[in-house]
Structure formats: C-alpha cells, structure tokens
Image (spheres, rainbow, N blue to C red):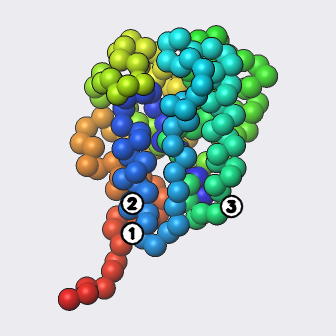
Amino acid sequence: MKIAFMGSHGVGKTTLCFELAANLKRLDLSVDLVKEVARRCPLPINRDTTRDAQQWILHTQIAEEIALEPAYDIIVCDRAVLDNYAYLVNATGRQAPLEELVRTWMATYRLLVKVPVVAPPSYDGTRDVSQGFQTAIDRIIDQLLAAYRLDCLRLPAGDRSDWIPLVLAALDLPPRASQLAMF
C-alpha cells in the first residue's frame, strides 16, 4: 500500500511522512519512505527548473516507488507524481505525453493526503522561499487534482496535532498501538 503526501514546498510534508512512518511502525507494520527526490536532482529545480529536471524527478519518483513496494507493507511517499508534475506544469505548461503516465500512476496510491499552505516557506538550503511560487504550485496541484478527478484527504489548515490521527483514521488504522503494559 502506498500513501502520498502532496502539496507545495515548505508545507510540512517531510515531517508528516516521518511522523506517519513512526506511527505505522508502532502498529507493527513494515514501512519505508520515498524521500523527496527533487533534493537529489542534478539539474536546476524550483523557479529555475527545466522540463528535463522535472522529468528526471517524476521518473525517479516512480522508480523508487517500484523498487520499495514489494518489500514493505506500506510505502509513505514524500510527494506523489502529481505534485512533481505540478512543478513541470508551472515551468512549461501541461505536457500531453506525460498526462496519461501521471493519471495512470496516481491510481497506484491507496491514499492521497493534501497538505495545506499555512505559512511561507523557510529556507533550508534547497527550498525556494517565494510565497508567490509556493501559492502558484499549490493552486496547480488543486487544478490537477480536479482535472484528474482524484479524491484526497485534505488536511485542515488548523492544528497540526490532528493531522496524523486523521490520516490513520482514513486508513482504518488505530490512532496508537495497543501494546501490553510491560511493568
């Protein structure tokens, strides 16, 4: 089973991925992460990205998901192919040859979780800090979700402490492991 956290940069997807993975491990599930591949891209990213860079990111994301899926109960993805594609759409417009790939691949996720923009992005050595760019990507993601008629769990913009329990409930999993007291 694959779960993908989607959203613009700087919204907390990576933190949520690690928090969810920790919760799933406490439920005795085997879990691994597909970490954000854009950070390893050898080509320009953010507002300087190119079609080649975004295709590298999109295809590397797919390859990493394929490699991990047979070995684990759950794969938690720091992005889905759709939000990777949103950066390409922002840079060069929609690409007909990639549309069917993105649409088809999106069906491989059991749960899509959309993380809202709640604050401007902060610089972390890689992330673009333009709030306008962050908002533009978020808007494109929403447009693509609508165009592809994809359902997702949209996390509320309020209290982040409720987010992991909401994801676990969407997966029909308990909010915490029921372990026997050891002492």
Q: Distance between the residues labelled 1 and 3?
A: 21 Å
**Residue drawn at (30%, 24%) of the image:** 122
- The first of marks 1 and 3 along the sequence is 1
**Residue drawn at (68%, 61%) of the image:** 70
Q: Which mark is residue 183?
A: none
What amino acid is at disc 2?
Answer: Ala
**Residue under circle 3?**
70
Secondary element at image label 1: helix
Q: How far apart are marks 2 and 3 (CA)?
A: 20 Å
**Mark 1 residue crowding within 10 angstroms, few (<14) / some (14–19) / many (20+):** some
What amino acid is at disc 3?
Answer: Pro
Whether label 2 touches label 1, CB < 8 Å: yes
Rendered view: 18 above or below 43: below
| Residue 8 visible in the snapshot | yes
**Residue under circle 1?**
26
Residue 48, horizontal then vertical, whole percent: 53, 11
Secondary element at image label 3: helix
167 displayed left or right of 62: left
Quarter holding the N terminus is bottom right
What amino acid is at disc 1?
Answer: Arg
Residue 49, horizontal then vertical, whole percent: 57, 15
